[in-house]
Image: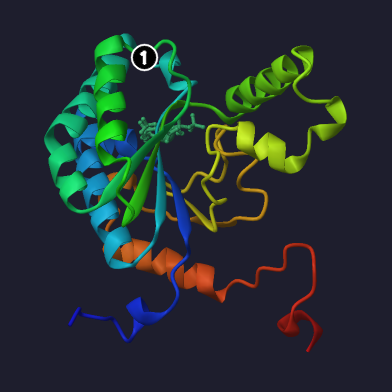
Amino acid sequence: MKHSDNGFENLTPPRHVAIIMDGNGRWAKERGLPRTLGHRQGVEAVRRAVRAAMELKITYLTIFSFSSENWKRPAEEVDDLMGLMKRFIRRDLAELHEAGVCIRIIGERQQVDSELMTLIDEAVELTRGNDKLTLVIAFNYGSRGELARAARRLAEQVAAGQIDPSEITVERMANALDTSGIPDPDLLIRTSGEMRLSNFMLWQTAYSEFVFLDCYWPDFDKAAFEGAIREFRARERRFGGLTKRSTA
Ligand code: IPE
Ligand code: IPE
Ligand code: MG
């Protein structure tokens, strides 16, 4: 039998948790270390988060790994982040596959170097049939870009006479996004104390519960994850309607 923390793991988990992994640089700075070491420790935190998500029986975990705005950082840091992504896939893919993790990528393919894109495509292909946990990696991702691409795709269909403008519905929009087929996040976590979305999943988080943690991403662990889920469980989700709790 699995260890359980006062039955914590027996309660229904959020189906989809999305994480804005923030604070690698500040973690390093506080220790007088270069930012790159913060990113390296950040990868360890990713491994812990994936393990914890599986133990907590979460079915979708999205991690914001590189934003479409992160190209603005110094070239050395960008190179470093690209290198870490490559190493992560090379080192962890077999283990993730073995554990039943299905990898999906959201974001813009253009700009990403072809060697990395090939690695990503291979990871997605290899793990396509897995269903224990879907790990959605937001890489070169920006929500406004994603929405613009979706709008363009639908406009092309209209121009080609495949659909009528009146057929552009919320569902069709959702299906034109990179996250097509992925349920909206129930819980969004951002570490490092920043309270903003930074162009992450603007459409998909319409009714997500937001939990902001003060810890820097390299310090994120299962206890922090459970703390966020505990806070999520204490929230009352109304989706615009009324619930028993709000009318009692
Ligand atoms: C998150 O940590 C990692 C990425 C954005 C790639 P940061 O690098 O943003 O760390 P801070 O926010 O500067 O501390
Ligand atoms: C958001 O963090 C992007 C990722 C976590 C990959 P940033 O550190 O880039 O966001 P800002 O610049 O503080 O808004
Ligand atoms: Mg940051």
Q: Please tell me which residue is depicted at 61% across the width and 48% down the height of the picture.
A: 205
Q: Is residue 108 visible?
A: yes
Report the front residue among 173 and 166. Answer: 166
Q: Please tell me which residue is depicted at 47% across the width and 56% down the height of the picture.
A: 16
The spot of residue 180 in percent (x, y) is 55, 39
Q: Is residue 53 left or right of residue 198?
A: left
The spot of residue 84 in percent (x, y) is 21, 27
* Figure coloring: rainbow
Report the front residue among 157 and 72. Answer: 157
Report the front residue among 104 and 29. Answer: 104
Outermost right residue: 166
Query: Which quadrant of the structure image shows residue 169?
Result: top right
The quarter of the rendering in which ligand 1 is drawn is top left
Q: Is residue 51 left or right of residue 141?
A: left
Q: Which residue is mark 1?
A: 112
The spot of residue 162 in percent (x, y) is 75, 21
Callout 1: 10 Å neighbours few (<14), some, many (20+)? few
